Image (cartoon, coloured by chain):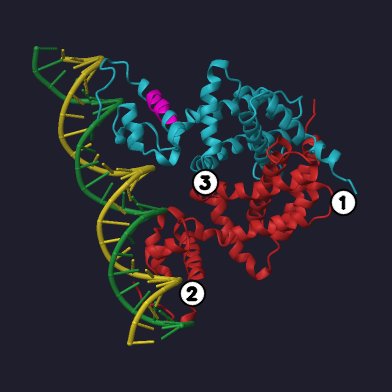
Chain colours: A cyan, B red, C green, D yellow
Amino acid sequence: MTVLADPRGDTRGDTRLRIEQAALDLFTRQGFDDVTTDQVADAAGISRRTYFRHFATKADAVWGDFAAHVDRLGQLLAATAGEQPVLNSICAAYVQVNDYADADLPMLRQRLRLILGEPALQAHSQVRYNGVDQVVAEHVARRTGAAPGSLVPRLVATSTRAAATTAFEVWLADGRLPLAQSLHDAFEELAGGFPTLRVAGRVG
Amino acid sequence: MTVLADPRGDTRGDTRLRIEQAALDLFTRQGFDDVTTDQVADAAGISRRTYFRHFATKADAVWGDFAAHVDRLGQLLAATAGEQPVLNSICAAYVQVNDYADADLPMLRQRLRLILGEPALQAHSQVRYNGVDQVVAEHVARRTGAAPGSLVPRLVATSTRAAATTAFEVWLADGRLPLAQSLHDAFEELAGGFPTLRVAGRVG
DNA sequence: GACGTTAGTGACACCGGGTGCCACGGGCAA
DNA sequence: TTGCCCGTGGCACCCGGTGTCACTAACGTC
């Protein structure tokens, strides 16, 4: 329902953005589960059927163009020189991919708060993470000569992604230190075999 | 439909098991998405409505009593002495929780193949993993004195769980070496900061 | 200017997961 | 027998997601 806000001809690529913004706003205000796709479509000035032509699922509107994100991560990894340790190259790629301008940080926070906080979106995220893990595992396999499906490439991929996710969570909860710093901290712990644990452990 | 297989009075706790078995068989044969809950219910000799009284979601039948699993993990962690390094205690707890009798291994493989292989079940698994991560993070927090929500406890929890999941995947794909060995290998890599990478890396 | 093509859209019907409600029936205690 | 409880089935409903058809505006061609 509701008349098109802009009857002129520039609404083509704009629609997707309008949907994203409407979805983020509604999900943030009311919670993901308490908003129907009808409401999102209505807020964006389109029909429900049209919503599902722009996004495959209700959750997808929160993710923006994540595939491009993963592609860029893969390109950054492929372009790394062989001199630096593998973990450093992965950390650097994660930092670069997530290097947002200050103006974009509020929207990033909004997206992440939903993705990391709403159970339904957490569930959905697992499938996205698989794409990331695969790209990273292939990078590790190239650099080490191991098969991409063997233990070390897989393990490096999943645990570095766990590190990145955790860094995001901490950054989101605290917000004092910049995201890049949080990522570096997490990777440093991971790469060093958790030095913090060794300091505190081995008490007896 | 279909008459109750056992009209005597011992079908109370038995129903849940029948549903699980029917679900595992159907999902394995036809794929999770190509089986409806009607079919599962029918195969188990109950109505769809009754299925959803035993399991909250279509996916839950695959997981068995996972909450008990997590509880036991938490108890094992709480009972560990403070002498051994934290990571070792987590590894030991994972190994113990997943110490199945040989007779139970086929069903475990069946469950894991579905959980790790079917996208819809992978998505569902994220919510389960949150419970595991929380238990592990609390353990690390107790042992280190850090806040459970701070970086290191969170990171240890997510990356050890990533290690465990990866070990499961490798065990499932290969099947040569025992699960406990696969878990130990993964934790050793993780705890050592990925020694394998250091051997192969730093070529230049 | 009439034409066919194409992309974006809306309306409708349908499927399947999940829930609330009511009604039935069998076991069990008073 | 009476009353209760619990597991169950049936039904209607909500919502996410899809297939299909019809409409319309924009565009190039003749």
Rendered-image quadrant of the N terminus of chain B: bottom left
Residue positioned 60% across, 29% down in the render: A74
- Give the mark nearer the N terminus: 1 vs 3: 1
State whether residue A39 appears in this view: yes
Look at the numbered disc 3 and give the secondary structure of its residue.
helix
| Kind of residue at disc 2 | Arg
For mark 2, name the chain: B
Q: Position of residue C3 (x, y in %)?
A: 12, 22
Look at the numbered disc 1 and give the secondary structure of its residue.
loop
Residue positioned 54% across, 16% down in the render: A103
Mark 3–mark 2 distance (CA, rounded to whole Å): 31 Å
- Give the mark nearer the N terminus: 3 vs 2: 2
Residue positioned 60% across, 58% down in the render: B67
Badge number at residue B123 = 3
| Kind of residue at disc 1 | Glu
State whether residue B177 appears in this view: no
| Residue B73: quarter of image | bottom right
Q: Position of residue A54 (x, y in %)?
A: 37, 31
Magenta residues (range): A16-24
Q: Sort mark 1 into few (<14), some (14-19) or many (20+) by Cα contacts within 10 Å.
A: few
The answer to whether the residue labelled 3 contacts the one labelled 2, judged by CB atoms less than 8 Å apart, is: no
Rendered-image quadrant of the C terminus of chain B: top right
Q: Sort mark 3 into few (<14), some (14-19) or many (20+) by Cα contacts within 10 Å.
A: many
Using the rendered image, report if marks 1 and 3 lie on a common chain. Answer: yes
Looking at the rendered image, the disc whose residue lies closer to the viewer, 1 or 3, is 1
Left or right, B30 with respect to A72, comes to left
Badge number at residue B12 = 2
Residue lying at the far right in this picture: please name it: A204
